[in-house]
Image: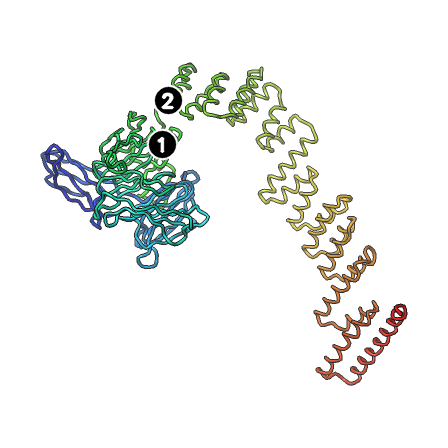
């Protein structure tokens, strides 16, 4: 990213001139203003190999670190960041899972911005068509799920759980990407000819969508959008004039306009939409209370004033907690401050960028270090910080401070993470009353049941073993159970957690129940079956006498000899034998399939298998022996097969054997016509006509008794 600066001075409200440096991008847009103490700036110089600069002010030299605005976002523990590839026009967007260290790269041409929420992120870039821009929704691996195109360049972007909101200098576009109709979009016209209007885009809008009427605006045509912030219910739009317009995302109504002292470069909303913060062009962060708006009686909608909760200088970013509305963290120069109800904690030295703040734990990423080697990020580039309340609660539990004092401290700093920490500490000390009440305070009903279960156990060693199992220290719990000579409890614990290989060790040592062995071997077989290790699964299914699963493993391994042996061992299990017959039929082994079906009480599947595999001799034999009613059906299907193969003489012989003279005459007529076309010998044609005449006379003789009976 390229910068250029302009140095100068301006007068503040008291009439005093303040030295400042303004930074611009190559397009002439003002990015940030740096205030410098002293009477005037004499000269400025950039360091040649980094983003640092030196300022000569009076008789002093000041050094400043300039941090560029990186394009990045976060999907849970997946960090999405962009960097320029050397000697390439495209931008490389990397999806890095900071836990598993998996990386997925995606090259994007003309990347404009990245934003994310929940499980999805949006990549905004220039499309291949001229003056067209693409909005692409991706998952955590960079797979494109859905996209949309727009003709105006989106300058500002923000995502919610169901909407992607982009803005130009005068319009805000709301795209409902989680809707059943993914092309649903709404355009919110912020300022045009001194009028504020809202209208819907014609493409993909529900017919019942209401379009609010236009309302007056205090902005002139020169006023434009400079920042965005949104939640599920609210949209805040920052304007160049210093005002912030508030809209309802449900009804798209303009609800209020708040007047600020300077232009908001960044806007942040807290988790319950009661407060928001802005960082202006000078790096001044202001926290404002939305519930304290005061307005003029003549114009209650516009020019509302908000109560300032907190104000900090030299801020480069901030992040609200996801579960506490009054808790937020700010990044000021090289320090990180945590605020609770406006009161700061001790700062922490860090230059990271916060991407998550929940459960009193801050997660930050060191983007500057990642950008030095962007293709090989390391887990050390993600740092975690705990709040003072969390650290103090853990320290009180570790140093054996009384649980009554810890209870009062947690109650004063009420948070479910602290109650959970106190409950776990009380469990380790077997203070079950405190543990049960702490579980109840953060609505962990299973923890309450577990504490009640421990109260009904009289043996302290067994209580400690159950607590170790609760914290997933299973080996320690097994040692405690062994010290009590309670192999049954160790066995029940391993069975409950599904650790069947440890169950096997315990059974070899102590327990001797056959049903437990069969149950263990069957689950071991299921373990290997899920991982497609058929041979090992078959060995365990053999030991557990699970014939059904053994059949499937033999079939998948193509061990048909073993499958044929099971036919004799599974006598009487008609359902299993039918499945084995279907398996043999699927691989074309007709005799084995017939053997399996013969062992069942229904031979119709065996006949169907012979017909399907075109084993007509076996089919006629089975029909003759077991089901004479199907002989006509089988015969018709067989004759259809040989006629399709142009074997008319074979079909004539079959019809003569069944005394079907009418069809014989019909086929002989076709054969005679074919002989004329092919020009067979006269003797061959004479035989055909003589045979046809004989069949006609025989058909007439067979039909005479029927006619006489009718008369």
For marks 1 and 2, give the CA distance: 15 Å
Task: Estimate how packed mark 1 is, as few (under 14), some (14 to 19) or many (20 or more) residues with alpha carbons within 10 Å.
Answer: some
Question: What's the residue at 64%, 49% (across, down)?
Answer: 556
Q: Position of residue 314 (x, y in %)?
A: 22, 34
Describe residue 103's horizontal placement relative to residue 522 as left or right: left
Q: Is residue 586 above or below residue 363?
A: below
From the image, tell me which residue sits under label 2.
413
Farthest residue to the bottom: give it: 682
Residue 144 in view: no
Residue lying farthest front?
298
Report crowding for label 2: few under 14, some 14 to 19, many 20 or more residues within 10 A (C-alpha): some
Is residue 549 visible in this depiction of the protein? yes
Q: Earlier in the sequence, mark 1 or mark 2?
A: 1
Coloration mode: rainbow
Compared across the picture, whether 448 is left or right of 48 comes to right
The residue beneath circle 1 is 321
Mark 2: secondary structure = loop
Where residue 624 sits in the image (x, y, percent)? Answer: 83, 58
From the viewer's perspective, tell me whether residue 33 is left or right of residue 518. Answer: left
State which quadrant residue 625 falls in. Answer: bottom right
The residue lying toward the viewer, choosing from 197 and 663, is 197
What residue do we see at 28% from left, 46% from top?
Answer: 196
């Amino acid at each position: 990213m390229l910068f250029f600066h302009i140095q100068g001075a301006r007068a503040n409200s008291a009439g005093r001139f303040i030295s400042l440096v303004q930074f611009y991008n190559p397009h002439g847009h003002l990015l940030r203003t740096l205030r410098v103490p002293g009477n005037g700036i004499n000269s400025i110089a950039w360091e040649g190999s980094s983003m640092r600069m030196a300022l000569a002010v009076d008789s002093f030299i000041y050094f400043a670190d300039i941090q560029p605005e990186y394009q990045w976002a976060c999907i849970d523990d997946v960090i999405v960041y962009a960097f320029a590839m050397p000697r390439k026009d495209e931008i490389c967007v990397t999806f890095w899972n900071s836990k598993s260290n998996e990386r997925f790269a995606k090259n994007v041409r003309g990347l404009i911005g990245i934003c994310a929420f929940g499980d999805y992120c949006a990549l905004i870039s220039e499309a291949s068509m001229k003056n067209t821009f693409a909005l692409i929704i991706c998952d955590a691996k960079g797979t494109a799920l859905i996209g949309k195109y727009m003709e105006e360049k989106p300058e500002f972007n923000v995502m919610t759980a169901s909407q992607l909101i982009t803005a130009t200098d005068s319009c805000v576009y709301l795209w409902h990407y989680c809707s059943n109709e993914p092309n649903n979009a709404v355009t919110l016209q912020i300022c045009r000819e001194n009028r504020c209007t809202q209208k819907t885009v014609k493409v993909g809008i529900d017919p019942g969508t209401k379009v609010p009427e236009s309302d007056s605006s205090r902005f002139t045509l020169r006023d434009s959008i400079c920042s965005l912030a949104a939640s599920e219910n609210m949209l805040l739009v920052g304007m160049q004039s210093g005002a912030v317009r508030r809209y309802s995302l449900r009804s798209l109504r303009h609800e209020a306009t708040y007047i600020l002292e300077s232009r908001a470069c960044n806007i942040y909303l807290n988790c319950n939409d009661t407060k928001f913060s802005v960082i202006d062009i000078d790096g001044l962060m202001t926290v404002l209370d939305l519930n304290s708006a005061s307005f003029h009686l003549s114009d209650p909608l516009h020019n509302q004033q908000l109560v300032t909760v907190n104000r900090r200088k030299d801020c480069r970013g901030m992040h609200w907690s996801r579960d506490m509305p009054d808790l937020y963290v700010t990044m000021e120069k090289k320090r990180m401050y945590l605020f609770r109800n406006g009161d700061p904690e001790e700062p922490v030295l860090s230059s990271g960028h916060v991407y998550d703040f929940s459960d009193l734990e801050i997660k930050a990423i060191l983007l500057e270090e990642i950008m030095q080697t962007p293709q090989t990020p390391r887990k050390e580039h993600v740092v975690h910080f705990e709040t003072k309340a969390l650290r103090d609660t853990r320290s009180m539990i570790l140093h054996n401070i009384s649980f009554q004092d810890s209870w009062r401290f947690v109650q004063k700093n009420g948070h479910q993470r602290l109650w959970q920490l106190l409950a776990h500490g009380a469990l380790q000390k077997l203070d079950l009353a405190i543990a049960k009440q702490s579980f109840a305070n953060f609505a962990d009903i299973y923890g309450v049941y577990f504490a009640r279960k421990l109260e009904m156990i009289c043996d302290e060693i067994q209580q400690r073993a159950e607590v170790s199992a609760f914290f997933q220290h299973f080996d320690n719990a097994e040692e405690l159970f062994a010290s009590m000579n309670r192999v049954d409890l160790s066995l029940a614990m391993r069975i409950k957690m599904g650790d069947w290989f440890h169950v096997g060790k315990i059974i070899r040592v102590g327990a001797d129940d056959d049903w437990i062995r069969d149950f263990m071997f069957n689950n071991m077989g299921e373990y290997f079956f899920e991982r497609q290790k058929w041979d090992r699964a078959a060995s365990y299914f053999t030991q557990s006498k699970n014939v059904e699963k053994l059949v499937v493993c033999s079939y998948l391994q193509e061990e048909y000899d073993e499958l044929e042996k099971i036919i004799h061992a599974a006598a009487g299990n008609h359902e299993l034998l039918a499945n084995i017959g279907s398996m043999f039929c699927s691989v074309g082994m007709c005799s084995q399939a017939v053997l399996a079906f013969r062992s069942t009480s229904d031979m119709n599947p065996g006949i169907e298998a012979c017909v399907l595999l075109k084993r007509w001799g076996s089919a006629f034999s089975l029909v003759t022996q077991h089901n004479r009613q199907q002989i006509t059906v089988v015969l018709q299907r067989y004759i259809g097969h040989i006629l399709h193969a142009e074997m008319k003489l074979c079909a004539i012989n079959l019809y003569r054997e069944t005394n079907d003279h009418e069809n014989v005459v019909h086929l002989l007529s076709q054969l005679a016509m074919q002989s004329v076309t092919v020009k067979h010998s006269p003797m061959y044609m004479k035989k055909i006509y003589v045979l046809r005449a004989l069949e006609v006379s025989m058909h007439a003789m067979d039909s005479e008794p029927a006619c006489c009976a009718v008369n």
